[in-house]
Amino acid sequence: MRPNSLLELDRDHLIHPVTSFRGHEARGVTVLESGQGMFLRDSEGHELLDAFAGLWCVNVGYGQNSIVKAAADQMTRLPYATGYFHFGSEPAIQLAARLAELAPPGLNRVYFTLGGSDAVDSAIRYIVHYFNATGRPAKKNIIALERGYHGSTMMGSGLTGLPAFHRNFDVPRPWQHHIPSPYPYRNPLGGDPAAVIAQSVAQLKAKVAELGADSVAAFFCEPVQGSGGVIVPPPGWLTAVRDACAELDILFVADEVITGFGRTGPLFACETESVVPDLMTVAKGLTSGYAPMGAVLMSERIYAGIADGATPDLPIGHGFTYSAHPVSAAVGLEVLRLYTEGGILANGQAVAPRFKAGLEALTDHPLVGDARSAGLLGALELVADKTTKARFAPDLRLADRLAARGYANGIIFRAFGDGVIGLAPALCCNHEEMDLLLARLALTLDQVL
Ligand code: PLP
């Protein structure tokens, strides 16, 4: 098919996520055709260094043949097996067991989903079920962070603290509440990490007091906020909020959809502080984007509460046709093998200091107000005035300009509307590729205005 007709078919039929529909029709699609390692090739023949791992998901990089083989073998043997009616498939069982082995201690029970949004939604449903089943039905409210992203389902988008995901959707928010993001760069207390942590804990406690301690079920957070602008809280923040949740008798849910699977260094970001959440949601790096899959991991306590609750003999009415899909599970098993025995996790950890140093060096650039990173998750925040930290005027369309200049320079990153450039290179990135990424980024900054 000629690229032009593909362009027209796209314009006329395909709805793209999180785009202005008319804006996309006018701009047209960039068709990605193939990928190898850190690089993508589009239908115009451009080679692009993917500094965003697709959508912060292709952590092992493109073109990993062993994953293709694992998927093909499973598809040939058995393309589908339901988890309903007590059936199952070997890769799904093995993957659940492997995740339980690798996850923070005690997160032994795994429910598979198709991605992150339905993992968050499933976690909410299980939490509601847990408190109903264990005789505390008043515990319904859930607190999350402003600027947090927890997916696009009707309930999960209410936990998401980004206005674009609420606008014109009449999101029902019977239980979802927010406290401010710690956001060190834009927090007046930002220079004092201990004060930022104390502030978050105080805000959480105040929100629980406002709602009534007996009515709050859980606190959800990303260990590093991704879609809100890669906001890295100070070290110790995760432990402090986790301890506050225990003290307040509310569940602590870590949404590791982005931060999981080596993105911030260890396999899970919670490991950095030895934090064990009550529930954890994962997706993206679980299969590295080679097949759709997410999961909710839960502690034995939550599982037992649901299992032995008020109606132990009746089915727990939550399930998807494609939960624990055997092809995705086979992919997940091979992806996990690549992270561990394949050395990809270790490679990501080895290249991360170069990434951090490169981003920090760019704070000398006149546009860069802040550089922040955790492992291979990073961001530059561009400002019109470094002293006042003023953002660029929206009519400058900085994000569009950055994306266009980046494309011309052979690099893909995430340009957020408020001047933040999000970066999440694959963990297979070598030192030369990292230097190329940083050079193309610097060139783009030089040319954007
Ligand atoms: N939670 C977090 C922290 C995410 O970053 C995302 C997606 O970016 C989601 C949930 C939703 O995941 P998905 O897009 O796979 O539905």
Image: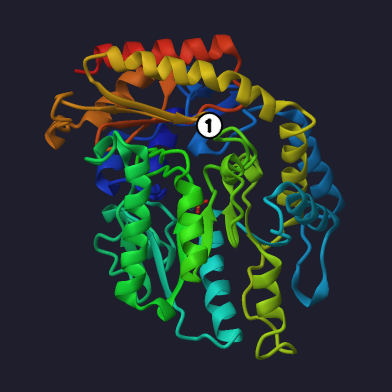
- The residue at 54%/35% (across/down) is 264
Q: Nearer the viewer, residue 10 or 205?
A: 205
240 relative position to 167: left or right? right
Image position of 216 with respect to 439: above or below: below
Quarter of the image containing the C terminus? top left
Characterize the local packing of mark 1: few (<14), some (14-19) or many (20 or more) Cα atoms within 10 angstroms.
many
Colouring used for the render? rainbow
* Kind of residue at badge 1: Ala
Q: Is mark 1 within 8 Å of ligand 1?
A: no
Q: Position of residue 146 (x, y in %)?
A: 32, 54
Q: In the image, 69: left or right of 384?
A: right
Q: Residue at x 52, y 85 (%)?
A: 136
The x, y position of residue 201, in whole percent, is 38, 56
* Residue at which label 1 appears: 53
Q: Residue 341 falls in which quadrant of the image? A: top right
**Residue 59 in the image: above or below residue 240:** above
Q: Is residue 395 above or below residue 362?
A: below
Q: Position of residue 317 (x, y in %)?
A: 63, 80
Which residue is at a point 44% across and 78% down the rendered structure image?
A: 140
User: Toward which corner of the image does residue 299 lie, by quadrant?
Assistant: bottom right
